[in-house]
Image (cartoon, rainbow, N blue to C red):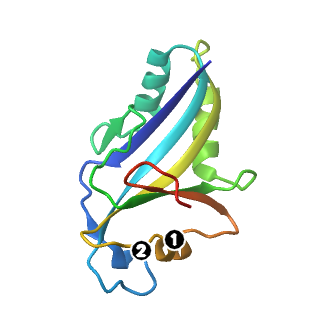
Amino acid sequence: MGFLTVEVVGKFESEQDTSKLLYAPLEQTAAFRKSRVYQIKYDGTEDQANSFVLRSLVDQYADEVSFSGAPYFKNFKFFIDYGMKPGALDLEREAIVSSQKDSNASEFKLLSLELSQRIYIFSDTEIGSELFVRDVCNPAIHVWSVTDADGRKVA
């Protein structure tokens, strides 16, 4: 059994103003970038898992992928990882799991899959995560965590 954390970033996306994320704009200047993070538990080889990721989760033309497990971007103030609560209907996850079960890859078995969206916040000034969590994450359906630039979970 193996475990793999993969981060997928759009090649053609760029930093955007954080006002697009918030109900009320910030007074200071800040930008954000989004990515998708997949945590995969599998039965098979690491090469088979990497092949599954590249075949099923990544658009070879439009996406870049990192298998390192480290944050893709640098110089961020913090990032928010958020995803569906356990038991909540996650259509993307269900589609991925279903397509893998339908394939004939009997040597590779997807044991579990966790998906989360990651939002990196970039700013030259100090900025808190509270507004972003409040406006992006819905406590009825999402679980989330906030990680600072030093790698500490702060929320």
Mark 1 and mark 2: span between their CA atoms? 7 Å
Specify the amino acid type for callout 2: Leu
Q: Residues within 10 Å of mark 2 (few under 14, many from 20)?
A: some
Where is the C terminus found, in terms of image quarters? bottom right
Q: Which sits in the foreground, 73 or 13?
A: 73
As drawn, 83 above or below 138? above
Looking at the image, which residue is at 59% across and 12% down? 107
Taking the image as shown, residue 136 lies to the left or right of residue 10, namely: right
Specify the amino acid type for callout 1: Val
Looking at the image, which residue is at 44% across and 24% down? 50
Q: Which sits in the foreground, 7 or 151?
A: 151
As drawn, 75 above or below 61? below
As drawn, 49 above or below 9? above
In terms of secondary structure, where does tag 1 sit? helix
In terms of secondary structure, where does tag 2 sit? loop
Q: Can residue 120 be seen by looking at this rendering?
A: no
Image coordinates of residue 78 in percent, x first then y, are: 40, 59
Q: Counting residues from the N terminus, which is met first, the one under dot 1 or under dot 2?
A: 2
Looking at the image, which residue is at 57% across and 49% down? 92
Q: Are marks 1 and 2 in contact (CB under 8 Å)?
A: yes
Q: Which sits in the foreground, 106 or 136?
A: 136
- The dot on residue 99 is none
Q: Which residue is mark 2?
A: 21
As drawn, 62 above or below 44? below
Q: Which residue is mark 1?
A: 136
Residue furthest to the right in view is: 87
Image coordinates of residue 115 in percent, x first then y, are: 55, 46
